[in-house]
Amino acid sequence: MQTQFVLDNLAQFVQVVVDKLPAFFAGILIFLIFWLLSKPIAGFITKPFIKPNISQLVQLVIRRTTSILIVLVGLYIFLHLVGLTQFAVAILSGTGVLGLIIGFAFKDIAENFLSSLLLSVQRPFKLGDIIEVEGYLGVVNKMTSRATTLVDLNGDHIQLPNSTIYKNAIRNLTANPNIRCTVDVGIGYDANVDYAQSLVAKIMRKQQAVLNEPVPQVLVNSLGSSTCNLRLYFWINSEVNSKQKVASVLMKSVVEVFMQEGISMPDDARERIMLAPENSGTTSQIKQEAPNLSTANNSQNNYHDDDTSSDHDDIREQAVNSRDPEEGHNIL
């Protein structure tokens, strides 16, 4: 009796399977068609809505999202044909829950991915720009969905998570290549300050690397123990000239002109106390001052290096020729 019951159930199951076989194969065929055509259909559907200026990452996300939705539709049709409609609804509704669970489990990864999307849309910088974020300064070499790679001025690679870049201030040195530079010069209190200022202003006007607009300025910055300190304010094009090289050329020119004009540039006075030998019973004190720059030998300062070219292109070349430390497609 029990054996007969099992055989009847088995026969009934086989009959159900046989009856569902056409729908099963049809469902499999439909699902495969949806799966194979998901990418072309997604590309065709999203093409009118994707503008050429949208970043590659945003375009990729839109196409892949549409493609996944198409595959889910094919899966729903397959399950519906084989009589698992409720199961299909459960899967589709559970997809959103699964997404939330994955989002919480991979919070940092999701945060970096969303930050990369926002950065690629807003574009606060582009490849080759020199930026500073969180104290890190370098050339933007690559951005992936996880991190942005900078090549700093020493040629080292710095990988910053995209969430760090998005949440912090970004200083773009390439967006406006004109930067203001300062140089400090100290002159003696016996010097004519107005005349010294006019000489320095003339030197800056003669230097081709210094921009005429905004106008260079020479202001009294502070009063030291032995010097009246002047500060030079001037602007340069950082893509053409180097801040450090221009400052070096200006300082050398100022020293030479001040020496020719007899304007002193004293150092802070230093006092040295020398003790005589113990058996002499006497102590001698000798006060020595640092030599005045105006009495230095001009013949020792014949070296001139007026090269003020910028190093930005050299750094960019280093970035291009360096090994890529991060796998993944560039999204900028």
Image (tube, grey):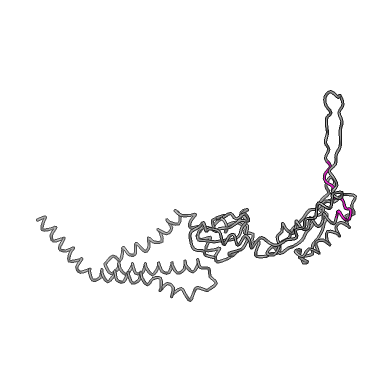
Question: What percent of the width, then of the height, locates residue 296?
Answer: 84, 49
Compared to 185, does 92 lie above or below? below
Furthest residue to the left? 1
What residue lies at 36% left-to-right and 70% top-to-bottom? 36
Q: Does 266 lie within the magenta span?
A: yes
**Picture quadrant where residue 277 is located:** top right
Residue at image position (53%, 68%) is: 55
Name the magenta segment's main secondary structure: loop
On the image, the x and y values in percent for residue 20 come to 22, 68
Q: Quadrant of the C terminus?
A: bottom right
224 and 65: which is toward the camera: 224
Q: Nearer the viewer, residue 114 or 259?
A: 259
Query: Residue 156 occupies which quadrant of the picture?
Result: bottom right
Residue 266 shown left or right of residue 40 in the figure: right
Task: Tell me if 307 is positioned left or right of 226 in this view.
Answer: left
Q: Residue at x 37, y 68 (%)?
A: 71
Q: Which of the two residues, 325 or 91, is positioned nearer the viewer here?
A: 325
Quadrant of the rendering where the N terminus is positioned:
bottom left
From the top left corner, tell me how far across and down residue 74 is, in percent: 34, 69
Segment colored magenta: 258-269
- Judged from this view, the residue extending furthest toward the front is 299
Total marks in image = 0
User: Residue 256 is drawn in which quadrant?
Assistant: bottom right
